[in-house]
Image: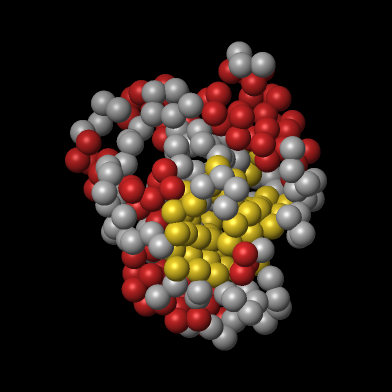
Amino acid sequence: MGTGEIITIGTATANCYLVLGEIPYLVDTNVPKARRRIMAALSGHGLSAGDLRYILITHYHYDHTGCLAELKRLSGARVAAGEKDAAVICGESPQRGPGDISPAGRMLRKVPASFLEKYHHFDACEVDMALREGDAIEELGLEVLELPGHTEGGVAFYQRERKLAFIGDLVSNFFHRPGPPFLSFSYDKGAILQSMRRLGDLDLDYAYPGHGSVIGPGAAEKIRALAAKLASRWGLA
């Protein structure tokens, strides 16, 4: 298996990523029904769940944590996530629910909470590494960047030498067109723009999003352009 090769495991809902090499790891775990695809991706590259050393979570939403508890149980991998989202992932704090920064979010806030909780449910899971800005996972060569706006504790994992980052939902890339996260479950447009600009200032060639295709080459430039467009649209220039 190629060292550092990144395998996209996609569903109609989201992406997660299997990174091969001496220390195999997974970035996010997709929705609960993605378990078979994840196991097939592992098997297809000569691995089992027990070979995973780390599971990195960009933020707590169910389409990123859907298989986390089971994969943690099967693999014994260390789970890493942003400190501000860790309490939700381990079940100590509730999910925030729909935001109020978009018409869709405001409409969803009128839906019974029990319905949304059932739809967005994931099994709680222990977080071994609650990460802050400036932390690093040295074995993997990854730096941790706090990127609030979609969730308060959202993070990216940046590999400086390879000029790539796993960015969660901060930037989508449907039909190869970079766009914002789903605003219905985001909470702060200003924070989203600030986090996008942070990515745009990096030496970043490829960005791996939670939704849509890989952004790149030239990921930083594309994200900067998106931030400028959104700032104008949102009146936050």
Left or right: residue 203 versus residue 27 is right
Give the x, y percent position of residue 77: 44, 72
Left or right: residue 194 versus residue 12 is right
Question: Can I make out residue 11 in this image?
Answer: no
Give the x, y percent position of residue 33: 37, 63
The quadrant where residue 151 appears: top left
Q: Residue furthest bottom?
A: 46
Left or right: residue 229 versus residue 235 is right
- Considering only vertical position in the picture, is 193 above or below 77? above
Give the camera-side residue of 28 and 53.
Answer: 53
Give the x, y percent position of residue 220: 75, 41
Question: Can I make out residue 153 in this image?
Answer: yes
Give the x, y percent position of residue 227: 67, 29
Q: Residue at x 50, y 60 (%)?
A: 56
- Considering only vertical position in the picture, is 16 above or below 52? above
Give the camera-side residue of 177 and 43.
Answer: 43
Q: Residue at x 62, y 64 (%)?
A: 138
Q: Quadrant of the C terminus?
A: top right
- Considering only vertical position in the picture, is 64 above or below 8? above
Q: Residue at x 44, y 54 (%)?
A: 130
The quadrant where residue 171 appears: top right
Q: Residue at x 27, y 52 (%)?
A: 91
Q: Quadrant of the N terminus?
A: bottom right
- Considering only vertical position in the picture, is 216 above or below 224? below
